[in-house]
Image (spheres, coloured by chain):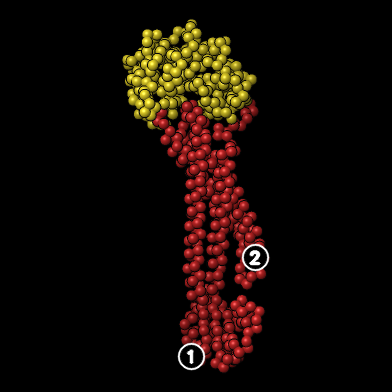
Chain colours: A yellow, B red
């Protein structure tokens, strides 16, 4: 098991949360003293019922939220102690598939998917062929020029996934990545994630679909009532 | 492979940018008019001051109340012998009476009004000594009044100085207003583009990359608005000057735009466009840096 909960395999951790708490303004804490760590090149499922806080925990990990207290360490860096520029550098090494897909509505499928490359100044000619190949692989080869408002939920989700893996990130974090696709495409996407994991990417997937876990040799984080536990023992 | 030009990450021509374009155009229009008024006024003032500096007027009053040719000739002889006078022009009686027509209209002057003989002098102010000449004329028994326009020139200089200060203050105020408008508009557009900023931040775009997108957008918008405003102001000014110069007033004022004025106006457009870009960049970076530290 590559995930260790509540203890520090610090040197080997690519993601480490130590006694992290989060609250919004004066509301009760969403999380309290959560600690976990993920080893490099691990493949982990984050499970729990709807509303348990899976998405919030992922946002803390991919630096979209800051903890109220505690340490969030990514690639060995305390995310709150580094400069904004360094944090942006770290973010560019994390591929994220959020539940709302976060596509830019006036950009085409191709342009949305290749945004991480464009944002770091890569020329389109340097990635066009590979990007089209990836988009074809996720079933969007005929939809390259389509705009997000014309896409189905499943198509939008696949664009978000393609964007997340486009620059071959060191960490891939996906929030319910198969929630809007048919089972066949779901399995295909899982193969993409496992393939990326085999080539060195650390993968963390949040899901409430127990069926997704079958047949994959992965670690497990369970979240319930603001607490995070290893395995099924809550 | 023929690669199409990528779509701009910030969508162009959005409805919330149109009011900004209109306001920036109006500000550029007003600023250009103010600048033109300053330039025209400065040139006219300079022209008037140059005229005054190279001219003097001598009035010769006669003791008997009639024009005395011998006194006039005597004065001309003295003037011809005075250094610093480059030309002497005796104003005819008819011309002298025409000079006071603006005050009395078309009425005939009563014949018993004493009209002094009037002589216009072109002078080289470096060599001309007004007080020495006045002394010489007095010593020769002539009753004269010599006006070298120094007081006029000084008054004109002071008045123009105040007007110029007011116009430049107005121009500064407009530029400051443009900065405030650009700042307000940037905030508004940033709010409406928050989703794009979030996505860019998530895919690892640097703050400067995001700011550059807004700088380019506002620079383009600012330049378009500034050029539009300046061109409209030039058209307005040309129509106004044609109308003014075709007038039949007695001021003899003839105003015109010069190539140097157009260069100043283009410079103004560049400054306004640059202000928009700089304000956008500063505001964008400031706003992004105020986003939750995540």
Dot 1: chain letter:
B
Q: Residue B139 carries which label?
A: 1
Q: Which quadrant: the C terminus of chain A?
A: top left
Reading the chain from its start, which is encountered first: label 1 or label 2?
A: 1
Q: Which residue lies furthest to the front in this view?
A: A27
Considering depth in this image, is B222 or B292 the residue closer to the camera? B292
Q: What element carries label 2?
A: helix
The answer to whether residue B241 is seen in the rendering is yes
Which residue position is annotated with label 2? B245
Q: Residue at x 61, y 60 (%)?
A: B257
| Residue B189 versus residue B228 in the image, above or below | above
Residue B122 locus on image (x, y percent): 56, 77
* Pick the front one: A20 or B138: A20
**For residue B64, what is the image quadrant?**
bottom right
- Outermost top residue: A215
Mark 2 surroundings within 10 Å by alpha-carbon count, few (fewer than 14), some (14 through 19), many (20 or more) = some
Instruction: Mark 1 vs mark 2: give the one in front.
Output: 2
* Label 1 secondary element: helix
**Could you tell whether B228 is left or right of A96 in the image?**
right
Alpha-carbon span between mark 1 and mark 2: 46 Å
Toward the bottom, the furthest residue is B64
Picture layout, residue B121 above or below residue B41: below
Looking at the picture, tell me which residue is in the foreground, B267 or B280: B280
Q: At which x and y percent is residue B83?
A: 52, 81
Task: Tell me the residue at 58%/46% (across/down).
Answer: B22
Q: How crowded is mark 1: few (under 14 residues within 10 Å), some or many (20 or more)?
A: few
Q: Where is residue B94 in the image (x, y as percent from the top left)?
A: 65, 83
Q: How many labels does the image show?
A: 2
Specify whether disc 1 shares its chain with disc 2: yes
């Amino acid at each position: 098991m590559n995930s260790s909960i509540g203890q520090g395999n610090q040197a080997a951790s690519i993601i480490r949360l130590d006694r992290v708490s989060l609250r919004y303004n004066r509301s009760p804490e969403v999380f309290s003293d959560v600690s976990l760590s993920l080893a490099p090149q691990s493949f982990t499922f984050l499970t729990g019922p709807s509303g348990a806080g899976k998405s919030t925990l992922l946002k803390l990990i991919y630096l979209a939220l800051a903890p109220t207290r505690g340490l969030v360490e990514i690639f060995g860096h305390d995310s709150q102690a580094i400069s904004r520029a360094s944090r942006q550098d770290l973010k560019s090494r994390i591929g994220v598939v959020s539940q709302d897909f976060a596509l830019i509505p006036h950009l085409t499928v191709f342009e949305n998917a290749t945004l991480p490359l464009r944002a770091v100044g890569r020329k389109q000619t340097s990635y066009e062929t590979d990007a089209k190949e990836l988009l074809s692989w996720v079933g969007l080869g005929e939809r390259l020029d389509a705009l997000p408002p014309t896409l189905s939920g499943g198509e939008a989700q696949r664009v978000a996934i393609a964007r997340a893996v486009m620059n071959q990130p060191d960490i891939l974090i996906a929030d319910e990545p198969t929630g809007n696709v048919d089972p066949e495409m779901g399995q295909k996407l899982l193969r993409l994630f496992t393939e990326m994991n085999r080539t060195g990417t650390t993968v963390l997937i949040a899901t409430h679909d127990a069926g997704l876990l079958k047949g994959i040799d992965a670690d497990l984080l369970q979240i319930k009532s603001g607490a995070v536990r290893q395995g099924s023992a809550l | 492979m023929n690669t199409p030009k990528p779509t701009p990450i910030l969508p162009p021509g959005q409805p919330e940018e149109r009011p900004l374009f209109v306001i920036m155009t109006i500000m550029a229009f007003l600023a250009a008019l103010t600048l033109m008024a300053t330039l025209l006024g400065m040139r006219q003032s300079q022209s008037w001051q140059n005229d005054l500096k190279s001219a003097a007027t001598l009035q010769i009053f006669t003791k008997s109340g009639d024009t005395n040719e011998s006194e006039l000739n005597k004065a001309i002889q003295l003037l011809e012998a005075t250094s610093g006078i480059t030309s002497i022009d005796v104003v005819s009686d008819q011309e002298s009476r025409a000079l006071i027509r603006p005050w009395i209209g078309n009425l005939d002057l009563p014949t018993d009004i004493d009209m002094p003989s009037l002589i216009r002098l072109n002078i080289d102010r470096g060599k001309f000594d007004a007080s020495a000449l006045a002394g010489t004329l007095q010593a020769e028994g002539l009753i004269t009044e010599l006006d070298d326009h120094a007081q006029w020139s000084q008054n004109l200089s002071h008045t123009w100085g105040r007007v110029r200060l007011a116009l430049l203050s107005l121009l500064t105020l407009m530029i400051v207003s443009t900065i405030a408008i650009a700042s307000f508009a940037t905030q508004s557009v940033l709010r409406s583009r928050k989703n794009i900023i979030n996505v860019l931040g998530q895919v690892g775009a640097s703050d400067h990359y995001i700011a550059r997108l807004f700088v380019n957008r506002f620079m383009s918008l600012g330049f378009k608005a500034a050029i539009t405003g300046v061109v409209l102001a030039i058209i307005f000014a040309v129509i106004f000057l044609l109308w003014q110069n075709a007038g039949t007033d007695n001021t003899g004022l003839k105003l015109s735009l010069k190539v140097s004025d157009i260069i100043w106006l283009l410079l103004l457009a560049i400054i306004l466009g640059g202000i928009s870009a700089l304000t956008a960049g500063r505001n964008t970076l400031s706003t992004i840096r105020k986003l939750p530290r995540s």
